[in-house]
Image (cartoon, coloured by chain):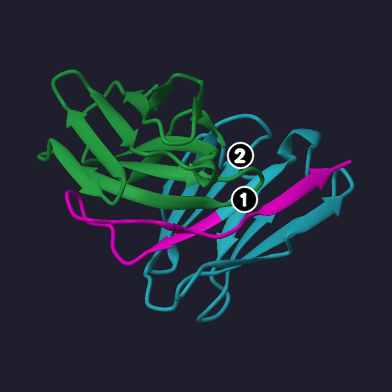
Chain colours: A cyan, B green
Amino acid sequence: EPEVTQTPSHQVTQMGQEVILRCVPISNHLYFYWYRQILGQKVEFLVSFYNNEISEKSEIFDDQFSVERPDGSNFTLKIRSTKLEDSAMYFCASSEALQVGTYNEQFFGPGTRLTVL
Amino acid sequence: SQQGEEDPQALSIQEGENATMNCSYKTSINNLQWYRQNSGRGLVHLILIRSNEREKHSGRLRVTLDTSKKSSSLLITASRAADTASYFCAIYNFNKFYFGSGTKLNVKP
């Protein structure tokens, strides 16, 4: 069964460093998303991506963050100059379609745990 | 906030009993989805209910939606120890998903 994969499973970085989190969405999916979940808190939407550009982003997704689809399979989240409060689980998700009123199940990857020291 | 909010925050039941979790939200929605998360793992999609639907079943799961009350419920019948997890509702509106804080379900064998 096709699944979303994410690497690495755990990333430890020093404050101020840049990190790139990688995701391989399901191959025929067109819409990609990043979410984060700070320990013990809600899953928070960060950004959605379609046709090589950002569709929607939340207030959290500021200039520190960027997303990219560098090739036909990977979808990356870059966090520049990491802060302690960036420590969280980051989930990638993908879906076939995103049309208002229609079915749009999102398939989530297992997550990358980012620890900023 | 448009986010769904689940209650109760935690629920502990015996295996075989039914578990009911509720979700309330504040805005109009396109659809509402329930997800499950095992500790430290990713989210698994359980069921989607559209705004024009009132009830949906999938195996031991039953979801209801009352758009007039802006609420949804997830019922797990004949619970099993393996159902122990956190359950989240997610509302989909204007191309974004909003997740609630979740209900932690503990099913004791």
Whether residue A4 sits left or right of residue A16 in the image: it is left
Instruction: Look at the image and give the residue range highlighted in magenta.
Output: A92-117
Q: Is residue A52 magenta?
A: no
Work out which quarter of the rendered image holds the N terminus of chain B and state it.
Answer: top left
Q: Residue at x 32, y 67 (%)?
A: A96
Between marks 1 and 2 in the image, the one whose residue lies nearer the viewer: 1
Callout 1 environment at 10 Å: few (<14), some (14 to 19), or many (20+)? some
Work out which quarter of the rendered image holds the C terminus of chain B and state it.
Answer: top right
- Please name the amino acid that badge 2 sits on: Gln
Residue B74, x across and y down, in percent: 32, 34
Whether residue A96 sits left or right of residue A109 in the image: it is left
Callout 2 environment at 10 Å: few (<14), some (14 to 19), or many (20+)? some
Q: Can residue B94 be spotted in the picture?
A: no
Q: Which label sits on residue B41?
A: 1
Q: Secondary structure at mark 2?
A: strand
Q: Residue at x 52, y 67 (%)?
A: A4
